[in-house]
Amino acid sequence: MLIGVPKESKVHEYRIGLVPMSVSELTYAGHEVIVETGAGCGAGLTDECYIKAGARIASGADEIFSKADMIIKVKEPLADECKKLREGQVLFTYLHLAPDEAQTRALLESGAICIAYETVTNPQGSLPLLTPMSEIAGRLSPQVGSVALQKNSGGSGILLAGALGVPAADVVVLGGGVAGSNAAMIALGMGASVTVVDCSAMVLASLSSRFGPRLRTIFSTHEGIAKIIQNADLVIGTVLIPGATAPRLLTADMIRSMKDGAVFVDVSIDQGGCSETSRATTYSDPTYIVDGVVHYCVSNMPGAVARTSAFSLNNMTLPFIKALADKGYLQAFAEDPFLRKGLNVYRGDLTIEAVAFAHGLDYTSAEMSLGLN
Ligand SMILES: NC(=O)c1ccc[n+]([C@@H]2O[C@H](COP(=O)([O-])OP(=O)(O)OC[C@H]3O[C@@H](n4cnc5c(N)ncnc54)[C@H](O)[C@@H]3O)[C@@H](O)[C@H]2O)c1
């Protein structure tokens, strides 16, 4: 199979879909890989590294999209990339279609086979290809939140750890899954006073036994959240309903009730965000202020730590990429129901129910589309 890796085109996105180690693995198995020139530079991976691993270097994205049987990316394709996709071409990347009707329609029109990293599952029912980036975004969130709390960023001028005789900052993490538990771990490590809110008693119990009494946990209710965020210095949103638009836990009124200069980091922004006041930002202008609350809503947070992220992502994606390349997508989907969960768009069919529901579009099951019934 000819596998193509274009350079990411999102603002300040420095990750790359395949690291050289993965290219070696694929070329060793008899596949061909073409990588757009300079695609790995942001992660410190030069064209020479890719040539050594067995890849060919393409001068531009057009060559990759016109020749490759399968495109491996990191972020969702932008409008001009959607236009380059060909009928029957496989696209394997993060898609986040629930909050993005324009992209959903463009992918349906392309006739391509679009597999989303974030909806691939595993036998434990979790999301193995979302996990590495959620871990990184979660770990980054107290770091970016602490900078946003600085006076020069528009924040209240509070240090997360406090100081001798001065209390530490109050951090509230909404959602205690992968991103949330990692956010809590780093915020605790930075000396903050941390509370995690989740709607799953099992999630709260596991956090409690992991962190002990240092971590406060509360069950997710509208009233409970409204109360706790009034005193918070930093709120980190990490809730997720797999495949669907993020639940809007914070209303504009709740944001208004927060302290002046408080910070809200919305990690869930790639699924539409968990506050009525959230709108996606990029690393070139990451924050904006609503009613005195600094909002940080960068939808590709791990892109800033591209090297760690690219390697971490590839560790998890490579087995699925190899299965698709070695067996062809039809056999790979037929044999692996967990990979099949990643199929969002198949030759003009929308095969993910939550996205069809979000946009009022027709849904066809992956099994039906693939003729597996
Ligand atoms: N912005 C970025 O750059 C970036 C990077 C990686 C991941 N993400 C996003 O981070 C989000 C979290 O991902 P994850 O892997 O941690 O998900 P996860 O499934 O591990 O955790 C989500 C948690 O939210 C909880 N939850 C759901 N509804 C809730 C509610 N109403 N109240 C309280 N808790 C609720 C769930 O019980 C679960 O524990 C996703 O939207 C993911 O796409 C964003």
Image (cartoon, rainbow, N blue to C red):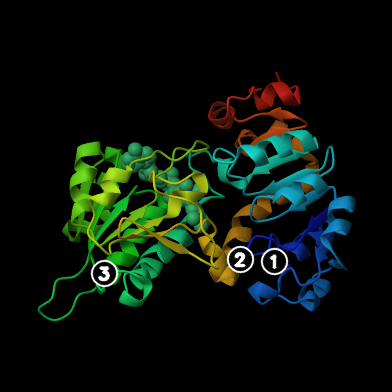
Rendered residue at 43%/66% (across/down): 140
Compared with 108, 233 (above or below) is below
Q: Which residue is mark 2?
A: 311
Q: Which residue is mark 3?
A: 156
- The CA span between labels 3 and 1 is 41 Å
Res 115 label = none
**Is label 3 or label 1 in front?**
3
Rendered residue at 76%/63% (across/down): 23
The amino acid at mark 1 is Val
Q: Secondary structure at mark 2?
A: helix
Compared with 193, 108 (above or below) is above
Compared with 202, 309 (above or below) is below
Whether residue 334 is visible here, answered yes or no, is yes
Name the residue at the top extreme.
Answer: 373
Percent across and percent down for residue 295 are 39, 58
Percent across and percent down for residue 64 are 85, 57
The amino acid at mark 2 is Phe
Q: Which residue is mark 1?
A: 19
Q: Quadrant of the C terminus?
A: top right
Percent across and percent down for residue 42 are 66, 73
Q: Say whether marks 1 and 2 touch (CB < 8 Å).
A: yes
In terms of sequence position, does the residue under pointer 3 or pointer 2 come before the other?
3
Q: Is residue 257 left or right of residue 103?
A: left
- The CA span between labels 3 and 2 is 36 Å
| Residue nearest the observer in this picture, 6 or 80 | 80
